[in-house]
Image (spheres, rainbow, N blue to C red):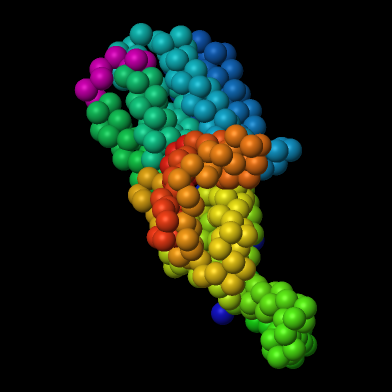
Amino acid sequence: MTPPSATETEQPLAPLWRGLLVYRVLTLLSAAAVVLYSLNAYAVPAGAVAVLAVMVAWTVATGYGYLGGLPGATDRRGHVAIADVVVTVGVMATTPLVQTPAQFAADAPVMGSIWTPGAALACALAYGVRGGLAGALALSAALLAFQAHWRAEVGDIQLLLLVGVTIGFASTVLRRSAERLRHAVAAEAGMRERERLARAVHDGVLQVLGYVRRRGAELGGAAAELGVLAGEQEFALRTLLTTGAAPVDVHGRRDLAAALRMLASEYVSVSTPAHRVELPAHVVDELVAVAGAALTNVAEHVGPDAPAWVLLEETGDGVEICVRDEGPGIPDGRLATAEAEGRLGVARSMRGRVHDLGGTISCDTGPGRGTDWTISVLKREVGA
């Protein structure tokens, strides 16, 4: 299977932008032929030639802009498309100035003729369905304003709207398909790299860590503590090799599910959705830090070998993380007392982080029933 090219994944609309340029050039030639053929029929022939010169210059300028010929132009295609609509409407606005009253009354083609829809197509490629519809409406309004009989333009307006919406829908589908392809390629590359690393370390690091864990348990005492540490690192390394870390993508987002799975250990069970749960990278870092602080509290106050559970769920408009243990629970007033004494670990490290994200954190605990931390964050609050 041939791997996808960089153009397919990073610039999926590149062929459509090239097709748009071809359309603009061909329609420009057609419009120029019509103007030059009937030049003497215009009220201001020099004005018609001047408008034609503007169309030629603008076609060249937008060609560079849409194809990335200018520095940074690729990121400004949307702005160029909006400017394209403005210039195109300006070209159409010259119709009553350069045409004779007879031409205007006879509903002769507006200045620009079939060259003008290119601006709506550019908006559709840049902004999707909404862009295509907005561009088509702007050109339709200009068409009605600069033609004598609006009923004759109904068919052209319908075609403009249909094409704008269709191309906008196609561009949206292509973008989403390219995004899924990028994720698939990244996942496959990550899986291959993990397999390569797993083969490299299995006969070395993992076996040594496993031996230290077993030998430490046999010897007991200080060696047992080293064995526990070795076992934790062995588990973390196996998790990294099997599930992978959560890298930041080109949009600055990370997979919260993958990041939380890195907290798993011999005593910590992590349950997450099978699909990606993408949030801005800094939000993922903060939520993982909060969950890690809760697990640290479990290790300190319940015991280093106390079991704990981390559960991630999507709630439709947000995410919810639960960290639970089955320890003795936090006595009533313990957190308030710690905060009053200046021990702000929970208040600052957990509550502060969550509140900065616009989320909520609650603690359900009591003697003999363990502790259950629940962290909730709305996606719209964190820009997801």
For the N terminus, the image quarter is bottom right
Which quadrant would residue 237 be assigned to in this image?
bottom right
Q: Nearer the viewer, residue 162 or 346?
A: 346
Which quadrant would residue 2 be assigned to in this image?
bottom right
Who's the residue at 57% across and 30% down the image? 79
Furthest toward the left, the residue is 151
As displayed, is residue 241 above or below residue 39? below
Q: Position of residue 173 (x, y in %)?
A: 42, 53
Q: Nearer the viewer, residue 350 or 74?
A: 350
Query: Does the magenta-highlighted stretch encompass residue 168?
Result: no
Q: Which residues are magenta?
A: 145-152
As displayed, is residue 2 above or below residue 175? below
Q: Nearer the viewer, residue 38 or 255?
A: 255
Q: Position of residue 256 (x, y in %)?
A: 53, 56
Who's the residue at 64% across and 32% down the image? 61
Which quadrant would residue 9 be assigned to in this image?
bottom right
